[in-house]
Image (cartoon, helix red, strand yellow):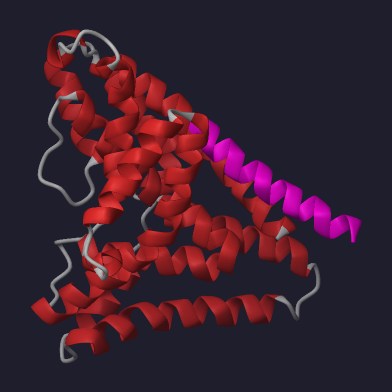
Amino acid sequence: MAIRLLAALIALGLLHLQPQLAHWRGDAGFRRWVHQLADTTGIGRVLLAVLVPVALCALVIWMLHMLPLKDLLLLVFAFVVLIFSFGPHAFEADLEAILKAPDQSSREAAAQALCDDCETVAWTTADLGEATAYAALRRRFGVLFWFFLLGPVGALLYRLARQLGHDSSLALDSGARTYARYLANGLDWLPAQLMVFTLALVGHWDAVTGAWRRWHQQAAPNSWYLSNPGFLGAAARADVLTDIEGGDGYAEERTDPLHELRRLRDALLRALLAWMSVVALIVMGSWLH
């Protein structure tokens, strides 16, 4: 766990200084592999496309454990996999591009970078907050959750599942696409739940937990893999609209999307620091024992 924490700190620090690192996709090999599986359809194609690269990653880790300086080599490998998994865009850089855009049309164009698998991001406080929360999940929190839980194998699994299920440029049959989205949505569910709880702690507790509770009361039992984690979007909308609804009710006239985006960015940063602090406490606790 200590190596994972150090790799995450280095990766996040470098991405802050050099956001272009997140654009390093290096996924040509994965695309060729998916194309070679064209004779396979449905769930079989999904399992082969994802599990073979993940198994190779696990094999590399096993081999590194047998080499001299294994801790250093494991750290470097974990860092490389994590940088790859954080792609294809730098989350914080995309937010800064919106905030620093010179005019309204530029801001609206920059906001589209937050959308991984949706058509457009409307320039409203609620829609912008929802898109920001989903981008944070898929480019930071989801990757980190599975990385800390399963190591580089988990981060790679999450990244490839997301790409396979939501990258329309990958030619998949309808059955494979459906199962790939089931896998991606399933992997989103746990980190999204934890992210909502953390966002409630650092933001508006009553509004966030209330939106989370209402969504789950209306959701189908199998919604955790059939659809996106809509409870996260609902929680983000509630968080950014809480202060507005506390006024005189003129939401559209009084709302400043840029102001709420800055506030949500700061809340997500506090949530990320909270996650890293918990992992650091776990590492220190293991050292004490």
Give the left or right position of residue 17, taking residue 132 as reference: right
Where residue 170 appears, as percent x and y from the top left, is: 17, 68
Query: Quarter-wise, where is residue 106 in the image?
Result: top left
Q: From the image, which quarter does the C terminus lie in? A: bottom right
Across and down, in percent, residue 20 comes to 41, 39
Q: In front here: 6 or 181?
A: 181
Q: Nearer the viewer, residue 145 or 9?
A: 145
Spot occupied by residue 237 in the image (x, y as percentages of width and height):
27, 33
Q: Is residue 98 left or right of residue 71?
A: left
Task: Give the residue drawn at x 39%, y 48%.
Answer: 137
Residue 62, by quadrant, is bottom right
Q: Residue at x 72, y 47 (%)?
A: 280
- The answer to whether residue 203 is magenta is no
Q: Does the magenta portion include 285?
A: yes
Query: Up-down: is 28 above or below 36?
Result: above
| Rendering quarter of residue 32 | bottom left
Image quadrant in which the N terminus is located: bottom right
Residue 270: tell me if it is visible: yes
Residue at point 41% right, 27% down? 265
Q: Is residue 115 above or below residue 223?
A: above
* Residue 138 in the figure: left or right of residue 164: right
Question: In front: 229, or 269?
Answer: 229
Q: In the image, which residues are magenta?
A: 269-289
Measured from the top left, where is residue 157 in percent x and y?
43, 69
